[in-house]
Image: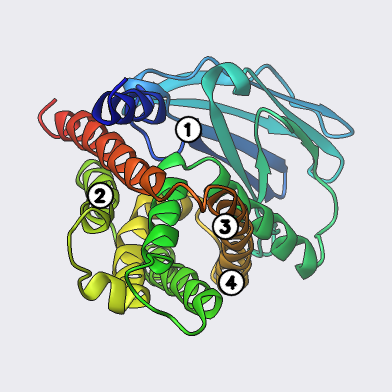
Amino acid sequence: MSRAGLALALAVGLAPAPARAHSLLFGVLSVVEDEGGARFVLRAGGAEGEPPPIGLRVTGACALDAPPRRELAGGLLVLSGRAPCLDGARVELDGLGAADLRVAVRVIRRDGSEDPVAFLDPVEPALTIAPRAAPSAVSGRFVALGAEHLALGLDHLLFLLALTLVVLDPRVARPRPARALALTVTGFTLGHAITLSLAVLGGLTLPSAPVEVCIALSIAFLAAELVRERPTLTFRAPWLVAAAFGLVHGLGFAGALAELGLPPREAPLALVAFHVGLELAQLAFVGLALGALWLARRHAGRRRLLAWSLGAAAAVWVGLRAADLVT
């Protein structure tokens, strides 16, 4: 098989059919305590505007008074019900795996304060509402969410791989390549943090479809740089390019995280913890990439083939995501 054919085959394997940056959809379960007990309201949207096939159960010490009411509002599924109390209620969501859904749980107390945001997903679909968690629980959950954000984003991983190839390109002599690579990854995290923070704290909103196209274009751009005959500014200052594209990639998750409706007192800690988790996961992935590249160090032509494969995968993504702009 020719190099072009092999690159195309790799591209088809790398580009997922739905062309989404991250597979999980998001929903929000709001639990509001009042004098009469607590009201539970779940709002969730499914793929392609269809309501997700999920169910809400509240059992334990504070079970629902009646089966939850099911409604459709603006394309969203709304499940609601009341319980006579709050602490001790066991919340369980059925069908999260089939719906590919992750749900943030907001608990608002009678005094107006809010508990740390919790998450339900296909792996952990249930939780028991207990007295407020310590601040360390908030940071721990969001560190894990930051690492998961990377692990579930194939385009994010491929962009990091392209950045690694740029920094380690043998045409550019770097006295401390490991330091340059760490700075580049951190620059990307900082750019990502800026737009994500603006979305959560400042209300920045952009349509997701154009952002997804730009994310795919960022991979295509780096792939094109890697096959150029002469190194450009991208190779001389990769941290600046990484930070600029980090702004775009941050917008790719901004809408989902903004939907969590983090309370003001909790949001700064959650954002810092999220990006700590993201940075640690990125450095771990880059370490794995370095190991693989070291094993293939005697096959310089394979790096060029990898660059062509990244570009082909990105081109497929651009086409699929651009189609969403006109549908």
Residue lying at the far left of the rendered structure: 326
Quadrant where the C terminus is found in the figure: top left
Check if mark 2's residue and mark 3's residue have beta carbons within 8 Å: no
Name the spot of residue 257 as percent of width and height, x first: 47, 53
User: First in sequence: mark 4 or mark 2?
Assistant: 2
Label 4 crowding class (10 Å Cα cut-off): few <14, some 14-19, many 20+?
Answer: some
Check if mark 1's residue and mark 2's residue have beta carbons within 8 Å: no
Amino acid type, label 4: Val
Residue picked out by circle 4: 272
Tell us which disc is closer to us: 3 or 4: 3
Residue 125 is at least partly visible in this image: yes
Name the spot of residue 18 as percent of width and height, x first: 35, 24
Residue at (48%, 85%) from the top-left corner?
A: 175
Q: Nearer the viewer, residue 219 or 254?
A: 219
Name the spot of residue 281 as percent of width and height, x first: 62, 57
Residue picked out by circle 3: 290
Q: Nearer the viewer, residue 74 or 301?
A: 301
Rendered image: mark on residue 268: none
Q: Secondary structure at mark 2?
A: helix
Residue picked out by circle 1: 23
- Total label count? 4
Q: Nearer the viewer, residue 61 or 136?
A: 136
